[in-house]
Amino acid sequence: MNQRRSFLKSSAVLASVLAAPAVKAASKTAPVVAPAAAVPNERIVRLYNTHTGESLRSIFWAEGKFIPDALQDINKLLRDHRNNKIAAIDPQLLVLLDKVSAQFGDHPTMHIISGYRSPESNAKLHANTSGVAKHSLHMEGQAIDVRIPGKDLAKLHKVAMAQKAGGVGYYPDSEFVHMDVGRVRYW
């Protein structure tokens, strides 16, 4: 069993390396990544950070376990871009992203508007922007704001709500959907 798990982990890492580097600088537009469907016992995310230009394609769960190296890469990509602080992203948020993106086909690349927010950044945003919660789940690594280019934002909102996995907010003027793994609520 350990040999099989080691083989699967090595295969997942190799597939990620061959498909796209873990974190790379993007050109002016999001990179095009060749489709590679996740097998049923794997979970995958494709992310593009709109603030840093970095992208990632990662199998973050396989054989019933989260892959620590993949989680570290995801944490780095979803860091607070204002001060480069990195925090652990709740793995259940990644599971939610996997489930939502799977509803749009072969896991399209999700554009990240906001991932982790340090308390300092959140306080500044809360003071200067309406709609930013004082105790945002972004500070806990349990919330993310996303869009999928070329996909209907209203559909993304409905798909996220259908998961009943936490809070879902719809921001059509800012072109993103907020998802979190807190209590179930919608706005």
Image (cartoon, rainbow, N blue to C red):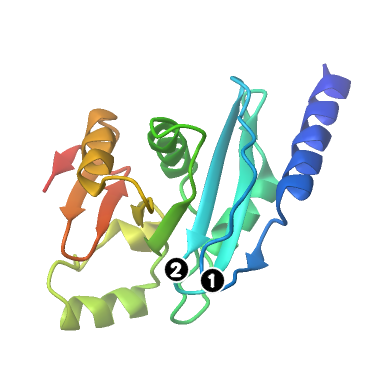
Residue corresponding to mark 2: 50
Relative to 59, is 104 on the left or the right?
left
Q: Quadrant of the N terminus?
A: top right
**Towards the viewer: 73 or 33:** 33
Residue 137 location (% of width, % of height): 30, 56
Q: CA distance from mark 2 to mark 1?
A: 6 Å
Residue 105 location (% of width, % of height): 45, 32
Q: Which mark is residue 131?
A: none
Q: Residue at x 44, y 68 (%)?
A: 50
Q: Tell me which amino acid carries mark 2.
A: Thr
Q: Residue at x 85, y 28 (%)?
A: 7
- The answer to whether mark 2 and mark 1 are in CB contact below 8 A is yes
Residue 139 location (% of width, % of height): 36, 63
Within 10 Å of disc 2 (Cα), the crowding (few <14, some 14-19, many 20+) is some
Within 10 Å of disc 1 (Cα), the crowding (few <14, some 14-19, many 20+) is some
Q: To which quarter of the image does residue 73 belong? A: bottom right
Q: Which mark is residue 53?
A: 1
Q: To which quarter of the image does residue 120 belong? A: bottom left
